[in-house]
Image (cartoon, coloured by chain):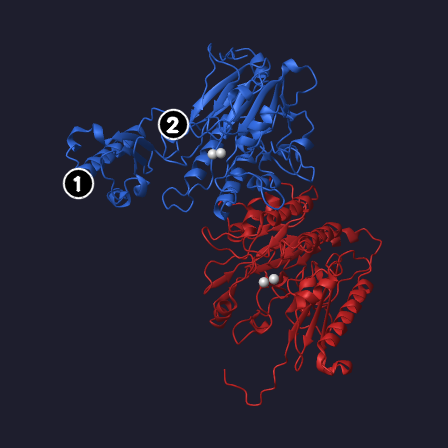
Chain colours: A red, B blue
């Protein structure tokens, strides 16, 4: 199934028919709208890149957008952020372009609302050009009176299709949205974020059931979207890949902010994991400094699929570097002034590097230096940053000091 | 202009044409959605009556709904309340029924959004059956970063048309929405709430300009909707009726919660003031105990108008009574027990009265006794209320004690 689809154009008229049976999905995740929205410099970064994502989807004329959770950074987004999200969705997702997909499954089980509203583009009162499907993440999960989340506003306004909500977390049945476009058939399994330990336990107890369509099973291309720790944090505080049912063809993994997208190939293993990563850096860590992407996934009538990585161009340049003071010859006198001067030069060089790496960007870069300072003294990093006001987006926290843990020979029993 | 319109039905075919030139507006105000939405008993009252209002508008097939502000009780409504409002608007305002009105004025000056979206029913991506127009009140006024209010969400979701926002409050130009239906022509002037003292001053400074349409002025029926104190609170803390320009035909006065609706008649003075009052009691005052209403205003091609008061049936029964302990013979021994027993009997009688007055209601009534208690002792009203748990909606605050101010002969200069 992981073979590439025939991409060559052949002049004959059958080509069109073939395209009518290719379902294209733009996949993005962790847009964290509203991340530091009170910051004078970075306040609109998340909305800006979300707009780029919607524009990419529009240009590509994808059949749908799939979001992997954490669309919003705050459980209760600020007025400005929620409003900004609605503006963008209205601008880019409404329109005349006909939706060519159909949903074959019972919609009442997918979309949590009490009024029987189904998928947004079937509502006769709306023209939806580009349907958005989203699960919730841990940042925008339902809570409080009415068990609502910010996605419920977008869903009731008919801007998105919010799915994957489970109310009982120790006995989970995921019923797929069965999507058909021409002869392409996709079963979309969604699971909004659940505390990792709880979901881990439910998996271990074999209480996570992925319901399968009853008709000829072989023809469905199975996608599973989830929003959980993929990286192991403790024994049960993550979801091992081995938990993913074998029949899944593609897993869309939300929550992990590093962009790590498996490309199909001979060595491709099952399931095929797509981890687009966040579209805005919400921490100044190494992983967030990786190039950020969204994915266009195409599936044809033979359940062959294609993965295309699209670079996000509006993301604020971010240069991350680690340095160990102990390894730098010229600093061995350990004079504090020397260290500060050295680091200031380093930051200036990184700013230059950012300009080179992102020649098109007109945004101040994020710069982060992580400094191993064993045997050195730290100093006031905020004061240090003042010389870079107007030169970096984060003058207050350019530097972070840490000490390597000493290697412990006798491991303490946990 | 205040003559009643010919209401008789005449069998001829011209009747239809005439109706095509009657613009009907359902007018409501101060719905205070979310008022005490954490109260177990009263929590959904505001949404319930708002639904009744939308149902009335739907049944009457009015051309539009006009809201006079304070649609929301809280500047930042709870998730449940905002979501509930959106659900109702989607359910009742979307649909195929064609809008027969047209807006002749430049829409970009009416609706505060940066994306050029005009009146909701003209957006080709939406089917709006019943357009809602609203100004903001003092409870849901724009504020904070982006100067947004809850109505902006509804507006961006295209559920309502939010108008009447003025950014400069000491030099106000109100540009009317010019609405035409057949030969009926209405100029709708809206002014969202401004602090009364400031607006009062702006009026005094002759800096409130009501712009007039440039073409043949005579044919426009002029409506002014505002949300201000009508009752005098201090010298400048209200808007005197004399400030209303003479050419206004009808004033829709929001903010005052008592339902006081002038019916047209021989003695009708100009301007004709419609004060629908709130649709939910937000205080247990005498005025809030009045029967609550909405209005259907109809305007024909000759600028004649008709006012119809519609009782709201879902409003929670509310019985208000005042009592002066000094005037009750049997209490003159002033034994505390006697007073409590007497008041408990009185409350029981009021509960019965509520049942009689509102035979159709299945809601626990609100009961308020305002007690003049000069020369008596007050007592714990919460403990008193416990005997009425399950019998009234407000057991904790049935009673309120007060003392009449002594008549002061020499008035203190203010
Ligand atoms: Mn995230
Ligand atoms: Mn997350
Ligand atoms: Mn009010
Ligand atoms: Mn008010």
| Chain letter behind tag 1 | B
Q: Is residue B364 visible?
A: yes
Mark 1 surroundings: few (<14), some (14-19) or many (≥20) residues within 10 A: few
Q: Residue at x 56, y 21 (%)?
A: B244
Is A289 situated left or right of A201 in this image?
right
| Chain letter behind tag 2 | B
Q: Is residue A276 visible?
A: no
Q: Residue A233 at x, y = what percent?
A: 56, 73
**Residue bearing mark 2:** B291
Above or below — where is B13 with respect to B187?
above
Mark 2 surroundings: few (<14), some (14-19) or many (≥20) residues within 10 A: some
Q: Residue at x 61, y 85 (%)?
A: A406
Separation of marks 2 and 1 at Cα, in angstroms: 34 Å
Q: Residue A254 at x, y = what percent?
A: 61, 63
Q: Residue at x 31, y 32 (%)?
A: B319
> Within the image, what quadrant is residue A9 found in?
bottom right
Which of the numbered marks, if any, corresponds to residue B337?
1
Q: Is mark 2 within 8 Å of ligand 3?
A: no
Is B51 situated left or right of A177 in this image?
left
Q: Secondary structure at mark 1?
A: helix
Above or below — where is A155 with respect to A29?
above
Quadrant of the image containing the N terminus of chain A: bottom right
Say which of B281 and A157 sits in front.
Answer: B281
Above or below — where is A176 with respect to B221?
below
Q: Is mark 1 within 8 Å of ligand 3?
A: no
Q: Residue A80 at x, y = what percent?
A: 61, 47
Q: Residue B148 at x, y = what percent?
A: 60, 42
Q: Earlier in the sequence, mark 2 or mark 1?
A: 2
Say which of B296 and B238 sits in front.
Answer: B238
């Amino acid at each position: 199934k992981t073979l590439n689809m025939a991409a060559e154009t052949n002049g004959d008229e059958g080509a069109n028919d073939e395209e009518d049976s290719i379902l294209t999905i733009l996949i993005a995740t962790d847009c964290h709208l509203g991340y530091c929205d009170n910051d004078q410099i970075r306040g609109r970064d998340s909305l800006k890149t979300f707009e780029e994502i919607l524009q990419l989807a529009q240009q590509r004329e994808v059949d749908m957008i799939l979001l992997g959770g954490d669309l919003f950074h705050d459980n209760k987004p600020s007025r400005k952020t929620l409003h900004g999200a609605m503006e963008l969705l209205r601008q880019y997702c409404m329109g005349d372009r006909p939706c060519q997909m159909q949903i074959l499954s019972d919609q009442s089980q997918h979309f949590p609302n009490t009024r029987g509203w189904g998928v947004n583009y079937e509502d006769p009162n709306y023209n939806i050009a580009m349907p958005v499907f989203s699960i919730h993440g841990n940042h925008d999960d339902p809570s409080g009176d009415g068990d609502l989340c910010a996605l419920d506003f977008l869903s009731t306004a008919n801007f998105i299709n919010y799915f994957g909500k489970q109310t009982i977390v120790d006995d989970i049945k995921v019923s797929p949205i069965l999507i058909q476009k021409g002869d392409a058939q996709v079963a979309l399994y969604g699971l909004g974020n659940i505390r990792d330990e709880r979901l881990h336990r439910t998996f271990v107890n074999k209480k996570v059931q992925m319901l399968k369509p009853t008709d000829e099973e072989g023809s469905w291309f199975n996608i599973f979207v989830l929003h959980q720790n993929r990286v192991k944090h403790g024994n049960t505080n993550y979801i091992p890949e081995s938990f993913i049912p074998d029949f899944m063809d593609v897993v869309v993994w939300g929550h992990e902010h590093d962009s790590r997208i498996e490309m199909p190939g001979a060595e491709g293993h099952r399931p095929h994991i797509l981890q687009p990563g966040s579209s805005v850096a919400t921490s100044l860590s190494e992983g967030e400094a990786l190039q950020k992407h969204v994915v266009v996934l195409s599936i044809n009538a033979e359940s062959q699929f294609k993965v295309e990585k699209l670079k996000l161009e509006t993301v604020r340049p971010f240069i991350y570097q680690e340095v160990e003071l102990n390894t730098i010859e010229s600093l061995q006198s350990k004079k504090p002034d020397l260290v500060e001067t050295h680091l200031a030069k380093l930051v200036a060089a990184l700013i230059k590097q950012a300009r080179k790496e992102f020649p098109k960007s007109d945004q101040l870069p994020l710069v982060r230096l992580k400094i191993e300072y064993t045997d050195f003294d730290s100093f006031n990093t905020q004061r240090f940053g003042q010389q870079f006001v107007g030169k970096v987006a984060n003058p207050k926290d350019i530097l972070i000091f840490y000490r390597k843990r000493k290697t412990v020979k006798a491991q303490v029993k946990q």
